Amino acid sequence: MEQDELAFLGKGLQMPFQINPSTGKTEMISGAENIEKSINVIMSTKPGERLYHLDFGIDLTPLLFEPADEATLKEIETRIIDGLTQFQPQIIPESVDFKINALEGVVLIDVKFTIRATNTRSNYVYPFYLKEANQD
């Protein structure tokens, strides 16, 4: 399907914010790419960071130093599914899987979902870093 045929999936600003030099207009994205970027923004935003939408986002940082046991992973899954259900109405979040790489300090969060308008199943992998890039 061409991008114009998927326009009903929505349109959003390209992030990071960009201006098209030939048109002078802001770059936009649409279709499945817009949904993926939206999921990334929701998962990367902590509640309280958006001035006029203080409840927007999913805060996983309180769980950073919890043991990576079944209870903690279930809490992360619940927060993600609840947050995406609330802030991304174009999808139906279905499940969340984890791949933990303690050596590199990252948890790969694989979110599986269905796009409501097309009934298409998809997934998005979000890297959740357990330590900052400048930490050893």
Image: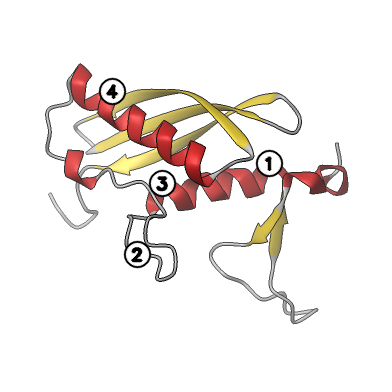
Mark 3 Cα shell of 10 Å, populated few (<14), some (14-19), many (≥20): many
Q: What residue type is labelled 4?
A: Lys
Q: Label 1, on which residue?
A: 32
Residue 21 % position (x, y):
73, 79
Mark 2 Cα shell of 10 Å, populated few (<14), some (14-19), many (≥20): few
Residue 99 % position (x, y):
33, 24
- Dot 2 falls on a residue whose secondary structure is loop
Q: Nearer the viewer, residue 25 or 80?
A: 80
Which badge, 2 or 1, comes first in the chain's sequence?
Answer: 1
Q: Nearer the viewer, residue 111 or 51?
A: 51
Which badge, 3 or 1, comes first in the chain's sequence?
Answer: 1
Determine whether, in the image, residue 85 is placed left or right of residue 121.
left
Residue 51 % position (x, y):
40, 71
Residue 18 % position (x, y):
62, 72
Q: Which amino acid does label 3 sit on?
A: Met
Identify the image quadrant of the N terminus: top right
Residue 49 has which mark? Answer: 2
The nearer-to-camera label among 2 and 1 is 2
Q: Distance between the residues labelled 3 and 1?
A: 17 Å
Q: Distance between the residues labelled 4 and 1?
A: 27 Å
Q: Label 3, on which residue?
A: 43
Q: Which of 52 and 110 is in front in this view?
A: 52
The nearer-to-camera label among 4 and 1 is 4
Which badge, 3 or 4, comes first in the chain's sequence?
Answer: 3
Q: What residue appears at the point 20 percent right and 21 percent down from the top-left corner?
A: 71
Which badge, 4 or 1, comes first in the chain's sequence?
Answer: 1
The nearer-to-camera label among 3 and 2 is 2
- Dot 1 falls on a residue whose secondary structure is helix
Which badge, 3 or 2, comes first in the chain's sequence?
Answer: 3
Q: Label 4, on which residue?
A: 74
